[in-house]
């Protein structure tokens, strides 16, 4: 069998084809591809919503001067020809006609939209054309809201000053793709572009039916691409014996006959890599992973992703020596907070940069920061939580005017601590210095306001005080992220002088990325199955970033869809750790005993897995406790709706039926092969079923409910989760935590322990009193 690559029809292409083949025979192992002139290009247009490129919720902007930024990136092999913004927004009906929304691209003003309060409190649309001359590969689009409710002195804190940018606003981008050099040094470009924001699908082509080692090599590569893509959602499509007619693809091939069909000749079967043009698409690239067998494919892939090895050119021939990767420890994924020592925020892969943690605004502001955590951290009330050493800077309040400032810390809407912010200048000289600096700044800004300067607001952003605070944050059960919110609160006296049209100044608030997080003292313990931590963090597979404790089980008669799901899942797990799955192992369902000591990911299509026929798979039902809890919650919701006359949203249940097309299932349970090991089962009967599963994991914001519990059914944009109560525990606790957990989990033991304690205390007191009575009687005798 060979790839369907027919000889070109036109005579000049035939001559070029034969000339290339002759060159191969003369020059040995050189890779030749049909040359594409650099001026070849292909134009395409795509439309995305702001939600699809990262703006999860509508954006609320408040005050006199507020802004929102988002990126619009273009692939490195494309040039932006134009962008059209189709904005949807609301604004306050109290705004005066001098209010406006200013749209900037790369700090250049594109358009100013007048906001007339007479049209407020209703949906407004606006289309904005962005010329290609100012577009680059990485574009910063800025929306600046300038609100006014009076021509006189205005308070930036007034509730009438608001603007909402809808996340269903659209970005239509037209790009032109151009030909690039065949160079392995650019990898993973063009297959993925780390800066790209849009979902993409990468075909993986297999010459014939792949063996276990080739599948492992493909899984390592897909996890590497997933780890390199950061926020980009990537799906992988498996193809047997057919090259895609357009775009890029990865090809795993061993047979020299296939290589000849691709205009490639190798002298020997040693592992090698090549990048050539797609013979059906001059702008597409094919990455060839070559070798005599699956082990050679794995050698090629590991050398490709090894950052210590610098590959270049369009062809590299390798030896059989495998590159050495450092041994991974539990919970040391680059995308997570390290659990063996304190770690700086800047050392976490994908953590926010300093620019994202700086805010300049009027008065009080919140600065958010999300820190990824291992999801199995265990905490009991009263014990040490997450230790945070937060370093920050803030504009000093003017104490001489009665101003004050404080910092309040919360975690996911839970109050943690608050701190008073002062200049710490308590000496007479310090107070005099502070008073003098504030007065100088006041008169300088007053002079600017008289001169109608563009920066006429009273700004105190150059008077910044650095500080740091230490505190502990208690943990939620199964908390996946530490969602710190730093609220900088400025308080001002009621009677304020109005200078530069506003009574309060601009202030600067900033968090530093050398702030540290410490969870090294927290135990790792969790009750599984818990599909929520699997969907959010890929746990328990991602406990070891290289997936050395993970096995993947495929049906013996696997097909393209099964392999596509496997590759997409490995890419999904790589995106959660930012590390490739270099130790993952694959087995067919009749070889499962080879992986009995591992956590298992099983992909079963059409209920054909031999393994599952011998296992008892938990059904989709809720435990009695959860059923009662849901019923009580539903009843409470109806009572509230009766009180305030609000409508009750009834969730349409997903029908449980194995014959339904489009019904994907995710089931978690303890491995029957080894206790305290996990099984995650993905089941479906069609390609659509597995697409639903992949979409629910890669794009959870598009679904009405999250994946959670022990079982999840997925249909279209609906997720129905169940919790059957069949738990097992993973991890370890210290003695105090173990006693607490046991008493909470088994309250009958708490009752028995209390009864035993009361009886024992009673016996001791009775024996003591009886002894005293006996002694008194003996003395009286």
Image: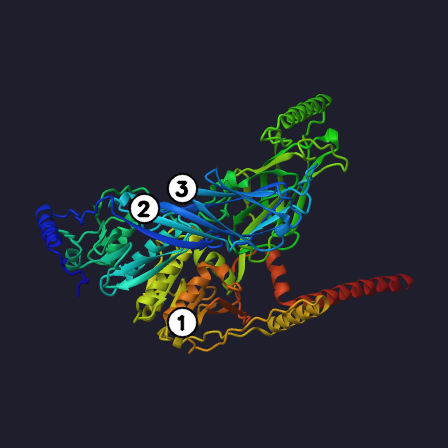
Rendered residue at 49%/57% (across/down):
536
- Image location of residue 357, percent across then percent down: 54, 40
Mark in the foreground, 3 or 1: 3
Residue count near mark 3 (Cα–Cα under 10 Å), binned few <14, some 14–19, many ≥20: many
Local SS, label 3: loop
Q: Which mark is residue 684?
A: 1
Mark in the foreground, 2 or 1: 2
- Image location of residue 567, percent across then percent down: 35, 60
- Image location of residue 735, percent across then percent down: 59, 56
Q: Disc 2 to disc 1, how far (Cα)? A: 37 Å
Local SS, label 1: strand
Q: Nearer the viewer, residue 75 or 129?
A: 129
Q: Earlier in the sequence, mark 2 or mark 3?
A: 2
Residue 777 seen in this snapshot:
yes
Q: Is residue 396 above or below residue 688?
A: above
- Image-based side of 340 in relation to 254, left or right: right
Marks 2 and 3 close (CB-CB < 8 Å):
no
Mark in the foreground, 2 or 3: 3
Q: Is residue 669 above or below residue 579?
A: below
Residue 729 seen in this snapshot:
no
Residue identified by numbered label 3? 135
- Quarter of the rendering occupied by the N terminus: bottom left
- Image location of residue 762, percent across then percent down: 77, 66
Q: Disc 3 to disc 1, how far (Cα)? A: 44 Å
Q: Which mark is residue 719?
A: none
Q: Quadrant for residue 496, please give it.
A: top right
Q: Is residue 690 above or below residue 89?
A: below
Q: Earlier in the sequence, mark 2 or mark 1?
A: 2
Residue identified by numbered label 2? 77
Q: Disc 2 to disc 3, how far (Cα)? A: 14 Å
């Amino acid at each position: 069998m060979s790839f369907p690559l027919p000889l070109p029809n036109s005579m000049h292409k035939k001559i070029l084809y034969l000339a290339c083949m002759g060159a191969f025979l003369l020059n040995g192992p050189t890779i030749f591809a049909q040359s594409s002139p650099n001026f070849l290009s292909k134009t395409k247009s795509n439309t995305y919503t702001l939600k699809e490129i990262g703006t999860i919720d509508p954006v609320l902007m408040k005050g006199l001067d507020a802004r929102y930024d988002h990126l619009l990136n273009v692939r490195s092999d494309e040039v932006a020809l134009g962008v059209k913004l189709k904005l949807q927004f609301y604004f306050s009906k109290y705004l005066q006609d001098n209010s406006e929304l200013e749209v900037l691209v790369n700090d250049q003003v594109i358009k100013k939209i007048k906001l007339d309060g007479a049209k407020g409190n209703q949906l407004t649309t606006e289309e904005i054309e962005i010329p290609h001359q100012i577009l680059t590969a990485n574009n910063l689009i800025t929306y600046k809201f300038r609100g006014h409710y009076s021509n006189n002195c205005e308070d930036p804190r007034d509730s009438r000053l608001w603007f909402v940018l809808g996340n269903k606003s659209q970005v239509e981008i037209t790009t032109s793709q151009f030909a690039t050099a065949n160079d392995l040094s650019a990898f993973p470009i063009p297959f993925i572009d780390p800066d790209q924001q849009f979902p993409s699908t990468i075909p993986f082509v297999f010459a014939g039916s792949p063996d276990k080692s080739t599948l492992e090599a493909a899984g390592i590569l897909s996890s590497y691409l997933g780890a390199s893509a950061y926020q980009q959602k990537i799906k992988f499509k498996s193809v047997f014996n057919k090259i895609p007619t357009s775009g890029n693809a990865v090809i795993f091939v061993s047979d020299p006959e296939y290589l000849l069909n691709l205009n490639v000749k190798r002298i020997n079967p040693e592992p090698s890599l090549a990048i050539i043009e797609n013979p059906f698409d001059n702008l597409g690239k094919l990455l060839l992973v070559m070798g005599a067998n699956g082990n050679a494919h794995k050698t090629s892939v590991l050398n490709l992703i090894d950052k210590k090895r610098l590959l270049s050119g369009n062809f590299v021939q390798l030896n059989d020596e495998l590159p050495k990767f450092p041994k991974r420890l539990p919970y040391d994924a680059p995308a997570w907070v390290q659990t063996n020592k304190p770690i700086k925020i800047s050392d976490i892969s994908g953590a926010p940069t300093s620019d994202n943690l700086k805010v300049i605004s009027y008065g009080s502001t919140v600065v958010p920061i999300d820190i990824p955590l291992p999801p199995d951290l265990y905490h009991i009330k009263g014990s040490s939580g997450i230790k945070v050493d937060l370093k920050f800077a803030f504009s000093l309040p003017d104490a001489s005017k009665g101003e004050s400032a404080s910092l309040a810390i919360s975690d996911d809407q839970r109050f943690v601590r608050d701190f008073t912010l002062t200049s710490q200048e308590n000496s007479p000289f310090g107070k005099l210095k502070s008073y003098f600096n504030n007065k100088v700044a006041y008169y300088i800004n007053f002079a600017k306001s008289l001169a109608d300067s563009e920066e006429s607001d009273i700004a105190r952003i150059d008077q910044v005080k650095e500080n740091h605070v230490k505190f502990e944050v208690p943990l939620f059960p199964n908390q996946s992220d530490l969602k710190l919110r730093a609220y900088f609160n400025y308080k001002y006296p009621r009677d304020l002088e109005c200078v530069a049209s506003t009574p309060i100044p601009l202030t600067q608030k900033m968090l530093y990325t050398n702030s540290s997080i410490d969870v090294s003292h927290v135990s790792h313990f969790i009750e599984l199955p818990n599909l929520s931590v699997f969907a959010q963090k890929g746990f328990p597979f991602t406990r070891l970033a290289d997936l050395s404790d993970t096995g993947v089980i495929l049906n013996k008669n696997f097909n393209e869809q099964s392999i596509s799901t496997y590759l997409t899942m490995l890419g999904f797990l790589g995106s959660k750790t930012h590390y490739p799955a270099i130790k993952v192992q694959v087995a067919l369902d009749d070889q499962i005993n080879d992986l009995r000591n591992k956590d298992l990911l099983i992909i079963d299509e059409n209920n054909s897995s031999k393994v599952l026929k011998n296992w008892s798979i938990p059904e989709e039902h809720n435990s009695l406790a959860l059923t009662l809890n849901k019923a009580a919650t539903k009843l409470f919701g109806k009572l509230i709706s009766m009180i305030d006359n609000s409508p009750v949203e009834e969730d349409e249940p997903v029908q449980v039926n194995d014959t339904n097309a489009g019904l994907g299932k995710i089931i978690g349970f303890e491995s029957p092969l080894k206790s305290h090991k996990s099984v995650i089962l993905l089941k479906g009967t069609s390609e659509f079923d597995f697409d639903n599963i992949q979409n629910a994991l890669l794009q959870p914001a598009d679904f009405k409910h999250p994946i959670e519990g022990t079982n999840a059914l997925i249909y279209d944009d609906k997720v129905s989760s169940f919790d059957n109560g069949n738990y097992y525990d993973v991890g370890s606790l210290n003695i105090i935590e173990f006693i607490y957990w046991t008493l909470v989990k088994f309250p009958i033991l708490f009752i028995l322990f209390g009864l035993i304690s009361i009886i024992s205390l009673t016996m001791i007191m009775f024996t003591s009193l009886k002894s005293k009575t006996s002694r008194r009687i003996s003395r009286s005798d």
